[in-house]
Image: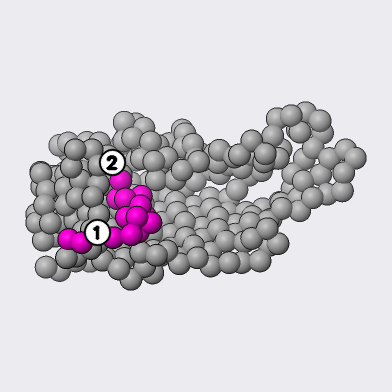
């Protein structure tokens, strides 16, 4: 499911002490326009005893829009969807530091995906098989959302939520939710708090502030550790209790792996990471 870029205004009654999310089931024919952005950039120098300073830099950016339409559902669990992908692009630097651009084979195509008996079947709109590489990429994008209820929405407190109150259980689920969507990461010490209600084009949303530490789990050959203290927000549509946006960003911190650090190696540099996911209902 890939934050709402449209500026919102405080909703009438936003100063109220409590907020209530009204959970609703999915409806066949409902469509969501989804966007995703992941960006990571850094320039770092590693130095230590007996070596010339080594410069390391990287730029990774992945973007993609899609529209998903519910074709079948059980309660809040989508079991069959039609999903149309706009251009899905990844930009990164190669070994020589030059940028290269990769466009996914599913870009500009529409598929039907169905979850049954623990697996996801992917076809074209006519129900015909598609190349395995395309099916694989569709499954990778839907595996955390098709055939199961969205974990963050499921963990939302039921009943009245006090504005200003921390949400420790939701924060715990948030950590695992993000780790599933960002392979090779550890999220920890997350804190979520309901801060306000705002008006958006799709309706009133509850805005949760988020802080979390992020550690990138590096390959064993990497000479440094990379982490970030993230800050951002999450928005949930009151009418339906649907997740609408997650927006996180932070500066990157660097440190040599333990063995190199003990040997006197040090890192110096800067970088940043940004993650933005949105889901916005479309007119039927």
Kindly report the distance in space between the C-alpha atoms of the residues bearing marks 1 and 2.
Answer: 32 Å
Tell me: 188 left or right of 55.
Answer: left
Q: Is residue 159 above or below residue 66?
A: above
Earlier-in-chain disc, 1 versus 2? 1
Tell me: 222 left or right of 119.
Answer: right
Q: Residues within 10 Å of mark 2 (few under 14, many from 20)?
A: some
Q: Label for residue 152?
A: 2
Instruction: Report if residue 33 lies within the magenta region.
Output: no
Residue at numbered disc 1: 129
Q: Is residue 268 above or below residue 57?
A: above
Q: Is residue 10 above or below residue 143?
A: below
The image shows residue 100 at horizontal and vertical percentages of 58, 66
Name the quadrant of the C terminus: bottom left
Q: Residue at x 88, y 38 (%)?
A: 49
Q: Which stretch is magenta?
A: 127-143
Residue lying furthest right: 50
Q: Can you tell which quarter of the image residue 271 is in?
A: bottom right
Q: Residue at x 67, y 39 (%)?
A: 221
The image shows residue 117 at horizontal and vertical percentages of 19, 38
User: Magenta residues: mostly which secondary structure?
Assistant: helix
The kind of secondary structure element at disc 2 is: helix
Residue 198 shows in this picture: no
The image shows residue 259 at horizontal and vertical percentages of 74, 29
Q: Label for residue 181?
A: none
């Amino acid at each position: 499911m890939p934050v709402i870029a449209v500026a919102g205004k405080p909703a009438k009654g936003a100063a109220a002490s409590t907020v209530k999310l009204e959970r609703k089931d999915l409806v066949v024919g409902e469509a969501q326009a989804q966007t995703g952005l992941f960006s990571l950039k850094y320039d770092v120098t590693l130095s230590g005893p007996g070596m010339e300073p080594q410069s390391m830099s990287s730029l990774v950016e992945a973007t993609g829009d899609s529209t998903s339409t519910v074709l079948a559902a059980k309660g809040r669990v989508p079991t069959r969807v039609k999903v149309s992908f706009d251009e899905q692009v990844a930009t990164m630097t190669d070994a020589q530091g030059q940028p290269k651009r990769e466009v996914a084979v599913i870009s500009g195509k529409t598929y039907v995906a169905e979850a049954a008996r623990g697996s996801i079947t992917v076809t074209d709109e006519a129900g015909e098989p598609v190349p395995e590489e395309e099916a694989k990429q569709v499954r990778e994008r839907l595996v955390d959302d098709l055939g199961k209820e969205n974990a963050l929405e499921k963990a939302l407190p039921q009943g009245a939520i006090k504005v200003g109150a921390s949400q420790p259980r939701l924060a715990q689920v948030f950590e695992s939710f993000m780790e599933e969507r960002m392979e090779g990461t550890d999220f920890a010490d997350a804190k979520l708090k309901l801060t306000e209600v705002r008006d958006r084009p799709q309706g009133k949303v509850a805005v949760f502030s988020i802080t979390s530490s992020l550690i990138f789990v590096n390959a064993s050959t990497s000479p440094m550790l990379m982490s970030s203290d993230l800050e951002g927000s999450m928005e949930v549509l009151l009418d339906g209790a649907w997740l609408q946006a997650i927006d996180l960003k932070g500066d990157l911190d660097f440190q040599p792996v333990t063995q190199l650090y003990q040997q006197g190696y040090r890192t110096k540099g800067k970088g940043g990471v940004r993650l933005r996911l949105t889901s916005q209902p479309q007119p039927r």
